[in-house]
Image (tube, rainbow, N blue to C red):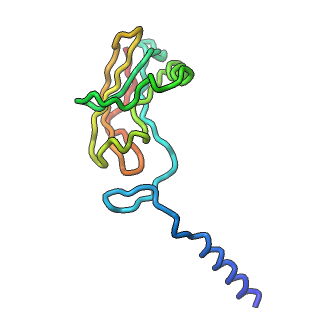
């Protein structure tokens, strides 16, 4: 009798832990997919010729062939910019902009950096996404100048 009660309680708890309100994280090509909860950002390392971090005053990234800005340093805090300058690592695109990309299609994104109000660099990367997260498709070596 005790075993039947135990099995009944375990079955009931397993049944109650499932809910019709549980939802998938994303829809991809008409199919429901479950995505991980991590948030991905593709960054670009920018270095001086002596391998020290390059301190850009401002930057932005955009889709190649358009003026559609993806990320802009004007939208970040001074503290965040100082951290990026300290390490020479700047964001190009993140999962927050995933919906601007076509799923499974490679998209060229360019990053533009400024020092003292003068454009000092432009670098292109190819990205895509898999319905859940952005993915880098091109090689991402540090930019040195």
Picture coordinates of residue 136 (x, y %)? 36, 39
**Position above or below: 69 against 11:** above
Instruction: Name the spot of residue 53 as percent of width and height, x first.
Output: 48, 17
> Going by the picture, which residue comes out furthest to the bottom?
1
Residue found at the far left of this picture = 65
Quarter the N terminus occupies? bottom right
Number of numbered discs overlaid on the protein picture: 0
Q: Nearer the viewer, residue 136 or 14?
A: 14
Q: Position of residue 38 (x, y in %)?
A: 51, 46
Residue 49 position by quadrant:
top left
- Which residue is at a point 77% across and 87% down the rendered structure image? 2
Q: Is residue 112 above or below residue 97?
A: above
Image quadrant in which you'd find residue 42: top left
Residue 24 image position (x, y, % from top left): 46, 60
Residue 136 falls left or right of residue 5: left
> At 45% across and 14% down in the image, what residue appears?
57
Q: Residue at 22%, 30% (x, y): give it.
A: 65
**View extreme (top): residue:** 116
Quadrant occupied by the C terminus: top left
At a point 65% along the width and 74% down the height, the residue shown is 13
């Amino acid at each position: 009798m005790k075993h039947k009660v135990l099995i009944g309680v375990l079955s009931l708890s397993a049944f109650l832990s499932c809910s019709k309100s549980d939802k998938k994280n994303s829809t991809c090509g008409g199919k429901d997919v479950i995505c991980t909860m991590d948030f991905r950002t593709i960054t670009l390392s920018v270095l001086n010729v002596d391998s020290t971090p390059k301190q850009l005053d401002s930057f932005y990234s955009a889709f190649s062939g358009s003026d559609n800005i993806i990320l802009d340093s004007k939208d970040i805090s001074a503290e965040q910019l100082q951290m990026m300058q300290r390490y020479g690592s700047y964001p190009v695109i993140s999962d927050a902009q995933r919906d601007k990309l076509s799923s499974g299609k490679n998209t060229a994104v360019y990053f533009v950096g400024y020092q003292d109000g003068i454009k000092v660099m432009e670098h292109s990367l190819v990205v895509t996404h898999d319905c859940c997260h952005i993915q880098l498709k091109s090689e991402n070596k540090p930019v040195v100048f």
